[in-house]
Image: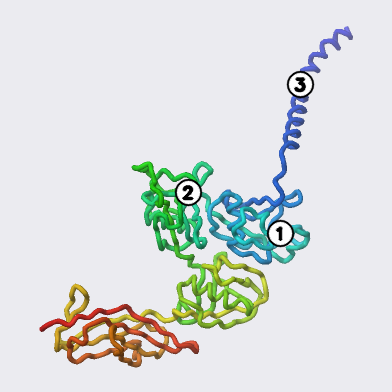
Amino acid sequence: MTVDRFRSVEPQLETDMIPAVILIILFWGIDLQAQSVSPPAELSVRLVNGTTSCSGTVEVFSRGEWSGVCSGWWRMMREVKVVCRELDCGNPVAESRGPLVEDGRRRVRLYRCRGHESSIRQCDIIGEPGDCIGEYYHHVTCSESVRLVDGAGLCSGRVEVKSNQSWASVCEADFDRQDAEVVCGELGCGAPAALQGGLYGEGEGQTWDKEFQCKGKESLLLDCDTSDRENNTCLPGNAVGLTCSEPDDVRLVGGGSRCAGGVERYDQGEWRTVRAVDLDQEDVAAVVCRQLGCGSTVSVLPGNTTRGNNIICSGSESALRECSRIDYLSPGLTVICSDLLFQPDISLTDSMGGVSRGHQGPEVFRGYSFTITCSTQPQYPGGSFLLTFTGSNRTQTQTAVNHSAAFLFPAADDSHQGNYRCVYDNYVFSHNFSSESELLSLTITGN
């Protein structure tokens, strides 16, 4: 009885052991699989804790672990451009300072990228422990499905769209200004300034086979409606190139003009003072005036010295976000650009009914009096208006009264026919400035 009882239990034991054996085999297989996965290549890059695969905090794989990146010389968009390129994302859109690096925690210091590198490992990197104490992580955003390539800056280039993990050029016939408005907005740039086929060369890969039908309000190009292209071919020279204006993230305040004042940059939801040490102030000012479309630098004045974001430019950048940034004790700066004054207006009036509108502009009957008025928007007190007459050295000058001046001509004759222009001159910020109006073409006609 005892033997028979044990014999009856033995099959039950074998049955109970089967799940355990299966689990052991599964765990053994998973362990072998984990051991067979190769670690990332040294100095590989990734973005974590972002809203898309092309946004997040920058991390670099270094010495067997993923580490955050800090940089005392973070070039705002230059390093971001390399990160976006390595991850096969689109253009750099934004960068911001993340949380403070924890004391004693090892991070990878990214010393310098030049912007043309294909991966972070080609940049200058120092990765010793403790390098990043007192500094910050970096959060970046790249576009996911559209980019501008071979342009002069971040806001110009040939339009390319990502489809099935590859980039394709867009034919000019499939892309209009409303489509351009969406692309410029998606890339963090200003309004479209130029749109032309072949403007930035031809792409080497495939061509996008759809026609975009954006309404101009979409946030992403791939959110727009599309339709099949009527003609399946895109002729050479028709790869669409786009130039967007620079982003509206820099301003000059307190100078009475959009082209004069203390420099501020919109960063992480607020306007912040831009600072620069003495040796870099001229270069920073040149970039500010260029980005604002305010001509060249006339003068740079240092402001109060405090600790904050110190900007370092070479002077050739198209926008301030392409410069370097370092946390440093440095002064703010006030910049005066050459296009300080508003453009004056020029107009023609008469009190005798002798002025009419012709095909080429205003016409005045011979013998009738007329007045040319120069005026400008209230900006600075004083100044004077110079009225020039094209084709001769004849000029008249009057002091501005209430920001205007009137030039009276008692009796029109043939010598008054030609082109007139107002030039407004004023002495401001210890410098002479001038601004010209548009031409006014005047015809003298018979009675």
> Which disc is residue 18 wearing?
3
Residue type, label 1: Ile
Q: Secondary structure at mark 2?
A: strand
Quadrant that contains the N terminus: top right
Instruction: Give the Cα separation between the discs numbered 3 and 2.
Output: 54 Å
- Disc nearest the viewer among 3 and 2: 2
Quarter of the figure that contains the C terminus: bottom left
- The outermost residue toward the right is 2
Counting from the top left corner in percent of width and height, residue 144 is at: 53, 50
* First in residue order: circle 3 vs circle 2: 3
For residue 336, above or below residue 430: above
Give the total of numbered labels: 3
Indicate the position of residue 179 as horizontal and vertical percent values.
Answer: 40, 54
Point out the frontmost of discs 1 and 3.
1
Question: Residue 125 bears which disc, if any?
Answer: 1
Instruction: Residue 48 in the image: state x and y as whole percent.
Output: 64, 51
Q: Secondary structure at mark 1?
A: strand
Residues 431 and 15: in front is: 431
Q: Amino acid at mark 2?
A: Val
- Residue pointed to by mark 2: 161
Vertical comparison of 32 with 288: above or below: above
